[in-house]
Image (spheres, rainbow, N blue to C red):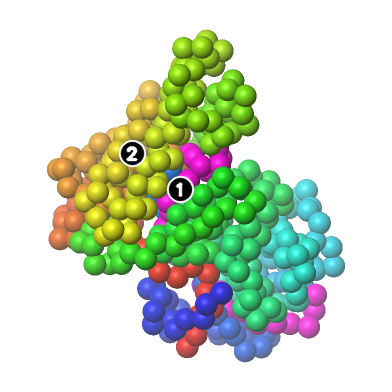
Amino acid sequence: MEKVSYRLVPGITEERMDKLGKILSSNGAGEARFFSAPGRVEIGGNHTDHQHGRVLAAAVEYCMLASAATCEQDVIHIESLGFGSIDVSLEDLSPVREDEGTSKAFVRGVAEYLADRGYALGGFSAVIDSDVPAGGSMSSSACFGVLIGAVISGLFNGSSIAEAELAKAAKYAENVHFGKPCGLMDQMASACGGFVFIDFRDEGSPEVEKIDFDFADCGYTLCILNSKGSHASLTDQYASIPAEMFTVAKALGKDYLREVNPQEFYDSIGRIRGEVSDRAIMRAMHFFDDDMRAVMEKDALKASDINGFLRLINESGASSQQVLENVSPEDPANRSLAFSIAYAKHLLNGKGACRVQGGGFAGTAEAFVPDDEVEEFSRRFTEVFGENSVLISGIRRYGAVEIER
């Protein structure tokens, strides 16, 4: 885990650090050290990770910042500004059913995972400030888990815990303690920073490649578009995507679509149609195409081919909407996400790119807008979708880090 000057991390200022340090000191803690982890966006490989596929993700400049100091008690005390405080005892780190779905579950789960692998633990106090927007699909939960791991790494392990291990600890906490099934993409993007290409063929040891690409100089700005649609009653629709992909893999004698040869799949469609639904077959088609597109997007970035990169993002978005069908929910009156994408494309007028971001249905979209058009694009989009519907961000170079003065 790197140590970097706050001057190199957008959004982190002396004022922000002073504020957290003073709160920590008022709680009776010792000298503050500072740690940060970013939110993330998914760029390519939409709904491929659960089939052991390949994805391209990126860290954003919205982040969580913690001031932390060790304490003598075997307790982790966390105060999150705006969300109150929690205490987690280190005496017993096994899952607590009553804490499922809470911050305590994340803290206990990360600590248990790291302790079980021989890393040192100790009591500490931390004050956390977050500007990762709630409901912005930037994975604040993964960011929080990674941040807790970063604090433990810095305070008790000489900052020696690898980025991939921090990501796995956060995923374990979310799966086992928090009670939410999820892949490793969100946590890995937050832990590593920058553009990250991840191959999940071996989910236990995914291959991670950081892409050296300076997004700040490419001529485009990332805008997260929040259509403010409701996620209520959409759990079944999210779950249907992996479930239907699994039915196709099973029909072809495999556990995951990544294990299926694409040509074998296409040659078998006539045989398996009827055994599996048409929508399941379409969703498998999307998997094979978007899995390869993530590789092509990575290659475009490495070649500094921004036009090819944007073309692939548009293609991936079209496949997600039309073949995977994760943009318009079954409710015909709830089309806010599809509407936001259509309107953004109208405003872009053939420039840049726009696609669904994350799981879909009622989530957010992402748009790559020419730098000189961001102000007008934001103004017109906000007129339709309301305040805070456009969140502007760069790509954060750093993942989980200790922040130095």
Q: Quadrant of residue 321?
A: top left
Left or right position of 113 against 64: right
- For disc 1, the neighbor class at 10 Å (few under 14, some 14 to 19, many from 20) is many
Q: Is residue 314 above or below residue 164?
A: above
Disc 1 is placed on an element classified as strand
Residue 158 image offset from top left, x and y in percent: 65, 81
The residue lying at 49 percent from left, 68 percent from top is 399
The residue lying at 15 percent from left, 60 percent from top is 372
Q: Does the magenta stretch include residue 168?
A: no
Q: Is residue 59 magenta?
A: yes
Where does the magenta region start and end?
Answer: 47-74
**Marking on residue 55:** 1
**Marking on residue 317:** 2
The amino acid on which the numbered mark 1 sits, given as a three-letter code, is: Val
Looking at the image, is mark 2 or mark 1 earlier in the sequence? 1
Left or right position of 131 against 391: right
